[in-house]
Amino acid sequence: MSPARVGIVIGAFAGRANRTIRVVWLLELSVLLLAVTVAVWLRFIDDPASRGLFIDTAPVRSLLVAVFVTGAMAAFGLYQPHVRHNRIDLMLRIGLGFAFGGVGLLVLYYALPSTYIGRGVLALSLLIGFVLICFLRLLVYGLFGMEAFKRRILILGAGSNADLINRRLRRRSDRKAFTVVGFIPIDGQAQVVSQDLLVPLQGRTLRELALELHAHEIVVAPDERRGGLPMDQILQCAQMGVAIVDLPAFFEREAGLIKLEIADPSTLVFSGGFDHSFPRRLSKRAFDIAAALVLLLVAWPFMLVVALCVWAESGSPILYRQTRVGEGGRTFDLTKFRSMRTDAEKDGVARWASTNDDRTTRVGRFIRATRLDELPQLFNVLAGDMSFVGPRPERPQFVDQLNEEIRYYNVRHSVKPGLTGWAQLRYPYGASVNDAREKLKFDLFYVKNHGLFFDFMILLQTVEVVLFRRGAR
């Protein structure tokens, strides 16, 4: 993946505040390193000799604590600034992050005893780190909500395209990393943006206005490009260090999606991405096999219990096979634990699943909510029909309908479908054409920007989806 692609992916996972979240992560790594240092001094306060022995290998062992805890915090959605947690939810997620990070460290210490830091030091480190990070999070939430820490953007355009920023990125959490300082109307183009948000040039050049408003970035968002853009003035702004970005790239970076309303073939063709090189295919396949085997090793007792529960409630078959569309439009048989009655589609007509679907069994409702019904798909991953991360595979009947009704829908089939994915993280369960259209915006972003780092971050954040039961029906 190119450096540009990596930047977009990091920006998407950090929500609209990629720079902010990198700062937060580095601060929390530093806090955890400090917590281990303080814990060592407290634990060996009367034993300088033991403290000296520990300090010899302290940097590596301290870093492992910091990495494991922040990794667990990422799995609980604490590095997604597009989500704003209330205080109770924040403390709960931090606490779970520390608990799971601690468990991960204990497993590591069992496998690699040389990394062990001692029960006393570990307990003190986690306790001190928890208190410090809770304080830091509350401080950061207050500080980074201030305008002084936000990127100031100027919008060139005041029509319907420019107004998408007001309509789609209107929440406070959507604008954590930027503030809109104004919309510049373009001569000869309709004005949709509210009058009080306009900043006409009024004889000034674009460069002069950007300097006056202390703009860091100009988003080019006209309704009509041909002949309506002051390219010389835009170039002057770029030369003095003001970033220039077009509207599709702005949405891709800030919202982690591709806006279908403003996307055209050139947006997808000339902006890079779509990596299908041999190294990428090899790394993705290796990631799929490793992740599937690890999850199977952990999940097989749960799979056995689910199989027994399905059989006890409604008999056989325990597994349910259904034809889905995969990479390149090829079909395959997807395997799941059966969660519906055996006569759910006795007339042979494919139907979307719905909230409180009366076709779902009691066991089925539970395993769908906890995603346990999807565990047999690990065998589809190992067989190569699916990837661990990718767009959700749909049934051929729905794909035929959606290809006709939604532009670019077939682009999602340029990669293997996934057990989990970017759209599943960012949008609730889809059960209609409108839902499919919204999810496609995230699927296209993944297809365009997929990479090993992106897959790993999606896998981490899937833990949050499963544990907090978001998006299942």
Image (spheres, helix red, strand yellow):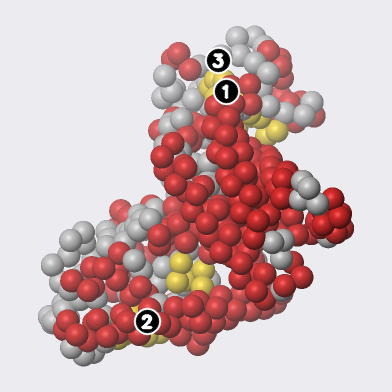
Going 53% across and 64% down the picture, which residue do you hit? Answer: 459
Query: What residue did someone put label 3 on?
Result: 199
- The vertical placement of 255 against 408, above or below, is above
- Identify which amino acid the numbered label 2 is placed on: Met
Q: CA distance from mark 2 to mark 1?
A: 48 Å
Q: Position of residue 260 (x, y in %)?
A: 45, 49
Going 85% across and 59% down the picture, which residue do you hit? Answer: 53
Labels 3 and 1: the sequence-earlier one: 1
Going 46% across and 67% down the picture, which residue do you hit? Answer: 420
| Foreground label between 3 and 2 | 2
Query: What residue did someone put label 2 on?
Result: 303
Please give left or right for residue 114 compared with residue 180 in the image. Answer: right
| SS at badge 3 | loop
Going 50% across and 68% down the picture, which residue do you hit? Answer: 390
| Contact, mark 3 vs mark 2 (Cβ under 8 Å) | no
* Position of the N terminus by quadrant: bottom right
Labels 3 and 2: the sequence-earlier one: 3
